Amino acid sequence: MVHLAVHDAVVAIEGGSRPFAAKIVAAPRADVRAAVATAAYLTARPRIAPANLAAFDQAYAAYFGNLPADVSVVDGVQVGQQAAAAMLALRANDGFATVVPYECSAVPPPIGEFTPDAGCPTAPGAAQPVDAKVGGIAPFTLRDAAMFRPDGPAALESKAYARDFAETHDMGGAASTLRTPEQTDIAWFWAENPYVHWNRNLMALARAKGLSVKRTARLFAMVHTAASDAIIAGFEAKYHYRAWRPRTAIPQADQDGNPDTDADASWRPLISVNHPEYPSGHGFWSTAVIGSVAAFFGTVRVDWTLTTSKAAVPALVTTERTYRNLIELLGQIGNARIWGGLHWRHALRDGALIGGRVAAHVQWQHFQPTR
């Protein structure tokens, strides 16, 4: 929402592409900095935690302290106000505030079904599975959240499942002797909160490429719109299929009906998260981000130096990695989720299909450059 409002504010002043939520008529010489800051501030503020509002308000005021006190800034603020109002009106009843408690289909969950961290039923006060509501949020560009729903996880008794099982068992366990130190570090590199990680690194990319305000606004709108719809579509699929994670599947493999999988009661993943396994979150999320970056630059050959916060991921050794090719980058992310013990390979492939399809949909239907 923030980046779409910013996009519309920038388009009103500088052009570049069609607006998303509303066409705004800007006064001549309206200050684009004031427009961007105001659009972002007013769009975000209703969803800022109360404890953070004072600091948020102070940051906005401090930013304006560095702008000239003239009519161009006043005009820019008006553009930002209109962009934010249009976006908030568009998303007023989008389902974001809906509370969706998770309930297992049975207690204990049947073989193959996701088990939350706190078990079933989840004890009062314990952490609920993450983002159970997200699949019910109204998409930004898709006709419905299930538009790109994949076919589902591999059958437990299948050869494909057994192959995936063996790979994740061998390479993703906390005590794996086959995973190299470098592979472990790569798994941790991709363990940071993806919103924080991708926002930081998209801003770094825009700076490194010297993008103008107009091009930056278009890039961020493309990427975040595709990512948001991919997340909505991906979590709709996650909670539709409710597939169990390796952390449950590997210790209980003697009950999966597959003669080629062996239970390992002591197996634990290197990294754990609290939502269903299929399809992979990084599969649909990161593919939507990277697909949109490739569409924006018109090539997969993009030099990109990414960083991860060691404060957020204390086990991390290498905090900065440089990639020369977006395909290489996407492949490493997929491997990282196997090396972290989070996924089967099948979930990564089907997650990537969602992200790729959403990115292409957004690319062709929205944000096309204009003269």
Image (cartoon, rainbow, N blue to C red):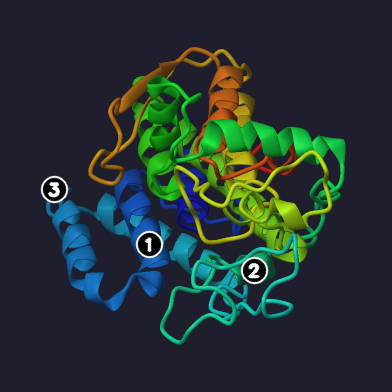
Residue count near mark 1 (Cα–Cα under 10 Å), binned few <14, some 14–19, many ≥20 = many
- The secondary structure type at the circle numbered 2 is loop
Q: Which quarter of the figure is the C terminus placed in?
A: top right
Residue 151 at x, y = what percent?
86, 49
Q: Is residue 146 left or right of residue 189?
A: right
Q: Nearer the viewer, residue 311 or 246?
A: 246
Whole-number angstrom distance, CA of label 1 to CA of label 2: 29 Å
Q: Amino acid at mark 1?
A: Gln
Q: Nearer the viewer, residue 59 or 308?
A: 308
Residue at 57% across, 52% down: 265
Residue 318 at x, y = what percent?
30, 25
Residue at 49% across, 72% down: 118
Up-down relation of residue 245 to residue 286 (above or below): below
Q: Amino acid at mark 2?
A: Ile
Considering only order in the chain, which callout, 2 or 1, is on the residue closer to the N terminus? Answer: 1
Q: Nearer the viewer, residue 152 or 235?
A: 152
Asked if one can make out residue 16 in the rendered structure from this viewpoint, the answer is no
- The secondary structure type at the circle numbered 1 is helix
Up-down relation of residue 67 to residue 186 (above or below): below
Considering only order in the chain, which callout, 3 or 2, is on the residue closer to the N terminus? Answer: 3
Asked if one can make out residue 205 in the rendered structure from this viewpoint, the answer is yes
Whole-number angstrom distance, CA of label 2 to CA of label 3: 38 Å
Q: Is residue 307 left or right of residue 284?
A: left
Residue count near mark 3 (Cα–Cα under 10 Å), binned few <14, some 14–19, many ≥20 = few
The residue pinned by badge 2 equals 137
Looking at the image, is mark 3 or mark 1 nearer the viewer?
3
The residue pinned by badge 1 equals 78
Q: Is residue 69 left or right of residue 50?
A: left
- The secondary structure type at the circle numbered 3 is loop
The residue pinned by badge 3 equals 66
